[in-house]
Image: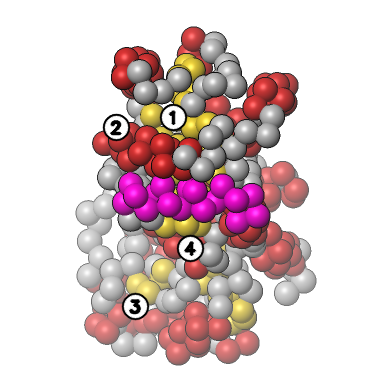
Amino acid sequence: MAASLGLTLYNLGQRRDQAEAGERPARPAGRLVWLHAPGEALVSPMRALARRLVEEDGLPILLTAPDTGPDLPGVIMQPPPPDNPADARMFLDHWRPEIAVFAGGQLRPAVMHEAAERKIPMLVVNGKAPAFLRERDSWYPGLMRQALARFRAILAVDEAAARAFRKGGANLSAVAVAGRMEEESALLPAQEAERAALSKLLGARPVWFAAGCAESEEAAVLQAHRKAAQHSHRLLLILMPEDPARAGPLAAELEATGDWVVAERAKDEDPEPGSEILVVDNPAEYGLWYRLAPITFLGGTLSGNGPVRNPMEAAVLGSAILHGPKTGQFGLVLGRLGAARATRAVASASGLGEALGDLLAPDRAARLAQAAWTVASDGAEVTDTVMQRIRAIMDGEE
């Protein structure tokens, strides 16, 4: 298909000032699926899709994103190609994908034109709205319509997103509302023997977990614990500082005040019946504390830079979530949880104490945790649908 006037003008404006450095890894033999996530919020569902395609279909995967995260078995992580004809050709010459799956709706006209010229089927998944890489769509007549027309299928997250793609010029028969794909699993491990032993030791004691607590938040957490303990006298706080090196000095400071009975995990001290605070320091044990604590406060959200841990880690393990106004890099995740009434947001130390006291009623914490778990586990059926479309296209069935 000849380049349109809009594409020609677009390509003339794309300088090769983003050329990739270094050599690409070797292409694996056989079939290859290319997945692309244009931003941080879309990396998690694409990693989940990549993992399932590797595990269930044995397909090698190329995943491109500005930041792809840690390595995944069977998945090649790469930065996306710059969107100009020369780099697009070099990228596709090397990788020769059998299918290309783009998340969100970001349009890369040069890359997509080259892919269409090679008859590589293309899909949009988790579609929200079409947008160009360099928001200049009004400069390029007909370019958005031409780019959208190249897609075999556009699977939108909701009807509003579907309308945006139709309005942008996508083929009406290609657009469908599929929903939001599942996020990458946030299920953290824990030693079952350790969990069972501590659970037996704690018995029916109420427990809450301050996860990744910033030093500037310690006073607020202690104030909330003291307030809630007035009505729940056996309440135990499991306190994990943001900086693990802070655990020892913090435990010493708490003991020195004479106001608290403290156990320190690093010294192999178990929480005795009279212990009020258990100071822990090993990030590898987050999964253990989420399992033991029905309520988790996300440290870093009151006065820090946002949570130091993904809120979905607590959600998927059934711990009700409390958090302050600082959402940091997990703003979208907390937004989804908040929209489902799956978290309790607080604005201050006093608000934290009040919310904690309220959630110590088991039925209230359970409702919050159930809503959070539903959000964390949502989207598996949508990912199934995406995988079925990928399989059908690769097998020549559509």
Tell me which secondary structure the magenta stretch mostly adopts. Answer: helix
**Image point 77% across, 71% down: which residue?**
397
Q: Position of residue 160 (x, y in %)?
A: 50, 83
Q: Amino acid at mark 1?
A: Met
Question: Could you tell me if residue 251 is visible in this image?
Answer: yes
* Residue matched to label 3: 7
Amino acid residing under circle 2? Glu
Give the labeled residue for mark 1: 240
Q: CA distance from mark 2 to mark 3?
A: 53 Å
- Residue visible at 68% across and 51% down in the picture: 53
Name the residue furthest top: 267
Disc assigned to residue 215: 2
Read off the residue under disc 4. Answer: 338
Q: Secondary structure at mark 3?
A: helix
| Residue stretch rendered in magenta on the structure | 348-364
Task: Examine the rendering and report whether any part of residue 119 can be seen.
Answer: no
| Color style of the picture | secondary structure
Cα–Cα gap, marks 4 and 2: 26 Å
User: Which percent across, then down, holds residue 189?
Assistant: 63, 32
